[in-house]
Amino acid sequence: MRRRDVLRASLLAAPALLTGRALQAAGSQVEDRGENEPVDVELILAVDVSRSVDSAEQELQFNGYAAAFRDRRLVEGIVGGPIGAIACMMFTWSDWQLQEVMVPWARIDGPASAAAFSDRIAEAPRRSWLYTSISGAMDYASRSFGQGFEGTRRVVDISGDGVNNSGRPVADARADALSKNIVLNGLAVLDRTPGAPDQGLGQPALDEYYRDQVIGGPGSFLVVAEGFNSFEAAVRRKIIREIAWNPPAGPLVERVG
């Protein structure tokens, strides 16, 4: 059994005996031995910067993520876990070979570290590319776990406004990620601005596409933002649910208008 599974089993078996401080102390001892530091969740934020996302919409995305990590409820959710900390990183994606780390892996365990992570997002460069490779984002995220941290859960938060049109089939990348016990959650942005490109004839509705072909794994879910102006509220709600410890069962699809 992997150390992450042992840790999760022990937390579930005796939560009253393992305080956040005790687990943080144990995490420090593990780190001293040159191993990955335990956290409640390893969370990757994968953000679409393909050509369908214009500069104003990209700004709304970055601002939405930055605001989420300054939200009191999100910070309370983080410190309320058994360990009281998560590890998070953020990268942007477009063509199958184009992924760029905006904020590297960081431990978030309270208001100060959450605010520092928010600042890094706000200061990150804004760049756009061409195509939409959800499969490339999945593959890159799958390779990015285990870099200094080990969570009882590994979650990828994929946000985008289009279907896969670059790289290998999404089904193959999704299957590979799920075989590694990675949970794939989605944030589908329905672009309601006049003149926005549609998905084309024969393409599925974006929310149905994300629901049926992108998300997967235990407790996975999809949040649908009804336009980029709804992105901030959608991403805040999504991350709070993702980092919650043993959250109550929620809907497969949530909509934020």
Image (cartoon, rainbow, N blue to C red):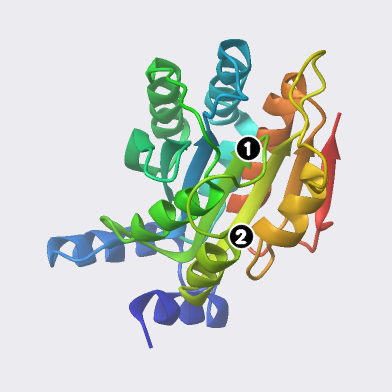
Tell me which residue sits at (50%, 74%) in the image: 11
Q: Give the x, y percent position of residue 112.
A: 41, 29
Tell me which residue sits at (79%, 14%) in the image: 195
Depicted 55 relative to depicted 171: above or below: above
Q: Nearer the viewer, residue 162 or 248?
A: 162
Depicted 40 relative to depicted 231: above or below: below
Q: Secondary structure at mark 2?
A: loop
Depicted 43 relative to depicted 160: above or below: below
Q: Which residue is mark 2?
A: 245
Q: Give the amino acid at mark 1.
A: Gly
Q: Give the x, y percent position of residue 58.
A: 57, 19
Q: Nearer the viewer, residue 80 or 231?
A: 231
Depicted 58 relative to depicted 78: above or below: above
Task: Let me know if residue 244 appears in the view.
Answer: no
Task: Let me know if residue 45 appears in the view.
Answer: yes
Q: Give the amino acid at mark 2.
A: Trp
Q: Are marks 1 and 2 in contact (CB under 8 Å)?
A: no
**Image quadrant in which the N terminus is located:** bottom left
Q: Secondary structure at mark 1?
A: strand
Q: Which residue is mark 1?
A: 160
Q: Give the x, y percent position of residue 244.
A: 63, 54
Tell me which residue sits at (68%, 25%) in the image: 232
Which label's residue is closer to the chain start, 1 or 2? Answer: 1
Mark 1 crowd level (few <14, some 14–19, many ≥20, 10 Å Cα): many
**Image quadrant in which the C terminus is located:** top right
Q: Give the x, y percent position of residue 178.
A: 54, 71
Tell me which residue sits at (48%, 36%) in the image: 94
